[in-house]
Image (spheres, helix red, strand yellow):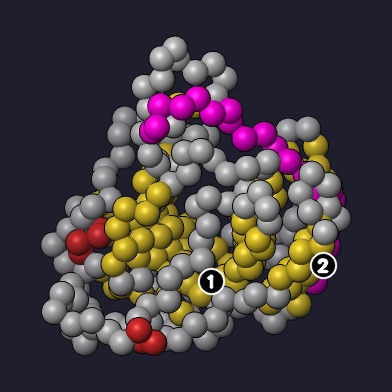
Amino acid sequence: MFVRSDHRVRALAPWLCAALVLTACGDDFTPPEDLAPKPSEYQPGRVGLVSLLSGGGGVEASLYERPDPLAPEVRVVEGECTLYTRPDEGSCVPVCGPGVCTPANQCVEVPRPASAGVITVTGLRQGLRFQPRPGGYELDTPPPVELFDPGASIRVIAAGADLPAFSAQLSGVPPLEVAFDTITLRGDRATRLIWTAAGVGRVSLEISIARPGAPLSAMLLCEADDNGSLTIPATIAGRLRAPLEGEAVRGTIARLERSVITTAAGPIEIVAGSRLVVAVEQR
C-alpha cells in the first residue's frame, strides 16, 4: 500500500485578546469557533518523524513499529499553547524486564525501530537519502547548513518495508528572524513573542524538559500562523514545572510546514522549516 499526503498546514489568523501585550486574556469571552486558535497538528503518539529543519541538528528520520507506550499526554490547552507531560510509570510486580510499566501496571515492550525502506528527499539544495539500519535511519551524506531555498518544492518519498510506502509534498519556508534570544516564562503575566512575519506555514515554539538522551518529560508547545506574534498565557507558563536535578530546559522556535501521514501503526509526522535555538528562563 502506498500512502500519499499533500496536506499543508494553513490556518486562519489566530484569535487574540485585545489586551494582548504582557497581560493574560480574560476568561469571560469565548471566541467564535472559526476565529479560535487552530490546534497544533503535532503528533505525540506518532510512530515516525522525518525532520528537515535548518538550524543544526534538525535533520533526521526515525520510524518505530508502534507508538511509545508512555507518549506525552495533553495536560492543559490555552490559547495557542498546549502543555504535555510524560505519564509516570506504574508499579508492576514483578518488575518489568526490558520493557516499561504503563500507568495501568502492565509490562509493555519498548517499540523497536521499523523501516519504510529508503527515504529520499528531493527539492533541497542537496538531495538526501535516509538509509534504514538495524538501529534506525542514517543519512548517506551530511546535509547542507541551509537545506532549501524559500518556495522550494520538497518531496519526501519512502519506498516501503515494515511500514507502508508513503510520500509527502512540502514547501521551503523563508529563514526565521526573531527579535529575541531569550524567552522568559512568568506565572504572573503573559509573554508575547515577536518575529518578522512571512505569511507562510506556521511558527512553532517548543520548550522541553528532559534528561540528556532521554525522552522529554514535559513540553510547552505553542503554535500560531506566521503573522509576526505569539502569546504564551501566564496560567499555562506557570504550570510548566522547573527541571529536576539532571534535567535540562531546551527552547526552539521554528517556521515550518507539517504533513501528517496516517498508517495502521500510527501517524508519521514530516516537517520542513527554519529553526532557531533560544534560551529559556522560568520565573
Packing grade of label 1 (10 A; few <14, some 14-19, many >=20) is many
Nearer-the-camera pick, 111 or 155 = 111
The residue lying at 26 percent from left, 43 percent from top is 242
The residue lying at 31 percent from left, 87 percent from top is 32
Q: On residue 44, which mark appears?
A: none
Residue 123 x %, y %: 80, 71
Report the magenta stretch's main SS: loop
Which residue corresponds to mark 1? 255
Alpha carbons under labels 1 and 2: distance apart? 20 Å
Residue 170 x %, y %: 69, 73
Q: Quadrant of residue 207?
A: bottom left
SS class of the residue under badge 2? strand
Relative to 184, is 23 on the left or the right? left
How many discs appear? 2
Mark 1 and mark 2 lie on one chain; the one further toward the N terminus is 2
Vertically, is 62 above or below 97? below
Nearer-the-camera pick, 31 or 189 = 31
Q: Which residues are magenta?
A: 103-130
Which residue corresponds to mark 2? 122
Q: Judge whether residue 115 is colored magenta.
A: yes
Residue 249 x %, y %: 38, 45
